[in-house]
Amino acid sequence: MKSASVYLLTLSFILFSCKSDYKEPPTQADDLNKNSVPATLNNPIHEISLAEYSNLAPIELKNSKTTDVYKKYGIEFSGNCYACDLAIFKLNKKNFDLVSLCDENDFHRFKDFDYEKKGDVLKIKTSETTFIFTKVENEPVYQLKIEGQKPKLKNKRFSEFYTPQNLIEKFEEHDCGDFQG
């Protein structure tokens, strides 16, 4: 009798102490799905961080021989200080804007666009044009290539290189200096 009660007590302990929350280990396919990044805005479940591309300012190559990125590039003098005809790129989830460097109220807005980011390349696709920003330095310096119909917009000329607006002050040539235009 004593052994029967010990047996029942042990069986009860085993049954009630086991957890039924067993989860199967993730498969390789589950890991890929969890870490994948969407290709377009049409997939709102996952998001690509647009912070580094939200406000890109034009720069140009100043000294290709130096390895210091902030001396190698600087503002495009003629477009910033003389002609004032360069485009700034502003991107968020809803809008893709090409903005005149000298007049924030002068902009061209694309509401119908998709984007995808693969590695160091961001592609922004509109109905007629694909803007390709490729990171070319360790710091956020992007080279712009345009495929398809290049938009012809007044006072919105495209530079070959762009960097986030908030980094412009770090470049050795970051303003017009004493230039009186």
Image: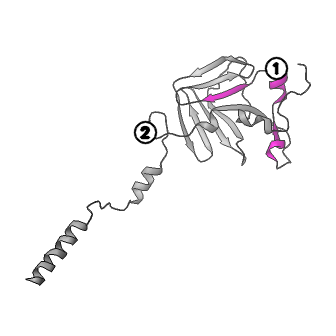
Bounds of the magenta span?
68-93
> Along the line of sight, which residue is nearer the eye, 167 or 112?
167
Tell me the quarter of the picture where residue 42 sits: top left
Tell me the mark number nearer the camera, choosing from 2 and 1. 2
83 left or right, relative to 161: right
Q: Residue placed at 71% from the left, 16% from the top?
A: 154
Dot 1: within a 10 Å radius of its alpha carbon, few (fewer than 14), some, or many (20 or more) residues? few
Dot 2: within a 10 Å radius of its alpha carbon, few (fewer than 14), some, or many (20 or more) residues? few
> Along the line of sight, which residue is nearer the eye, 11 or 138?
11
Q: Residue placed at 69% from the left, 40% from the top?
A: 142
What residue is pinned by disc 2? 45
Q: Residue placed at 20% from the left, 68% from the top?
A: 15
> What color scheme is it?
one colour
Q: Quadrant of the C terminus?
A: top right
Tell me the quarter of the picture where residue 76 sits: top right
The label number, if any, that marks residue 83 in the structure image:
1
171 left or right, relative to 14: right
104 left or right, relative to 21: right
Q: Amino acid at mark 2?
A: Ile
Rendered position, 12 above or below 132? below
